[in-house]
Amino acid sequence: MNLSTFDPDAPQVSLSLMAHGMDLDATLTSGQSFSWKRTTLGHWRGWIDGRPCLVWRQGDALRAVGAGLNREAVSAYFNLDQDFDAITASFPDDPWLVKAQDFAPGLRILRQDPWETLCNFICSSLKQIVQIEQINHELRRVFGNEIGAGLHSFPDAARLSLATEAKLRTCRLGFRARHLYVAARQIASSEVSLDRIAQLPTADAREQLMRIQGVGEKVANCILLFAYGRAEAFPIDVWVERVLRRLYFHNNPRVKHERLRAFADTHFGPNRGYAQQFLFHWIRKDPTALPAEKVPMTRARKKPASPLSISLPPRKPLPAAKP
C-alpha cells in the first residue's frame, strides 16, 4: 500500500462480511500474525492492507471498521472466499488431527503482507509470541510513519535498509538485528524480489526465500503459508516437531528432522499447512492435548568398588578395662 495516499481523516468505512464460521479469536492468537491487540470490549485492533482498523464477530458476520477499508482487502486478508470444507475434506483419516480441529474448528489462515511476515518470522527465533508482538510494535514506533495518534505503519525495506544494526537492537531484536538489517538491504536492492516469488512454484519460491539472511526452511515455510497462501507449506518448529514425535513416532528421539519432514509432506495431504496450524494451535492452547510423556527407565550400573569405598564390618567393642 502507498501510505502517501492514506488519509487518516477520511470517513470511517464500516463493512459487514459473511464470516463463514471463522473463529476470530483463535485465528488472531494462533502465532501467524503479530500486530493485533484485543480490546476490553472483545474487538480486535490491528492492520489490514496497511490501514488501521477494528474487527469483530457479530453473529454470522465479520464486522470491520477503518478509514479507507474496502471489502476486497478485508476478504482477502481473512481468506473468506476459500472453500474451507474442501480443505478439511482433503485431510487424512487421522484421530489426532480430528482432535485438533475439534478444539478450534473456526481457525483460519490469514493472507498477510510478505514483507511484514518476513520480518516477523526472522525475528521469531527463540522468541515467544508476545515478544514478537513487542518487536513488531517497536519497529513501527521507531521506524514507521506516524499516520495517527499512536499509530505507526510498518516500515518498508527501504527504510530499514538505512537503519543501523545498533538502532535495530533498540527494538528488542538482539542478535536478530543483523539478520533483519541484511534482509532489508537484500529486498531494497531487489537482490531478492518478494513480488517475483509470488509467481514461482512453491519449491522455487522456498529456495529464493532461503537466500535471504536469517531465513531457513522453517521461516521460509511460514512466509509461504501465511503471506503467499501456499497451503502445501508445512512449517516445523519446536512445537510441531514435538507433536509429530509424540503422536506419530512414539516419542522416539532418534527420528531425524528429514524423516519428520517426509512424513508431514505425505501424510497430511495437499493442504498440510492447515493441518499444521490446527496441531500447532491445539498443543499450545490445550495443556491436555498431548499424552503424558513416558520417561524410559534405566537401570543404574553397578560400579566396582574401590578399596577406599569398601564397607568394612563394624569393629567389636573393646572390653572394658578392669579396675
Image: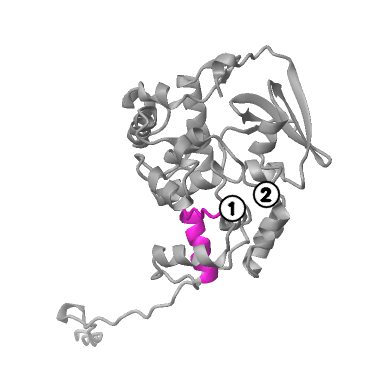
Q: Regarding mark 1 in the picture, which secondary structure is present there?
A: helix
Residue highlighted by disc 2:
107
Check disc 2 and give the amino acid type.
Answer: Leu
Residue 43 in sight in this render: no
Is 257 located above or below residue 143 in the figure?
Answer: below
Between the residue at mark 1 and the residue at mark 2, the CA separation in whole angstroms equals 8 Å
State the extent of the magenta-drawn residues as a range. 231-248
Q: Nearer the viewer, residue 84 or 297?
A: 84
Is 270 located above or below residue 118 in the figure?
Answer: below
Check disc 1 and give the amino acid type.
Answer: Gln
Is 80 located above or below residue 1 in the figure?
Answer: below
Q: Regarding mark 2 in the picture, which secondary structure is present there?
A: loop
Q: Main secondary structure of the magenta part?
A: helix
Identify the residue at image location x=60%, y=46%: 30
| Residue contact between numbered discs 1 and 2, judged by CB atoms under 8 Å | yes
Residue 257 position within the rendered picture, expressed as x and y whole percent measured from the top left: 40, 63
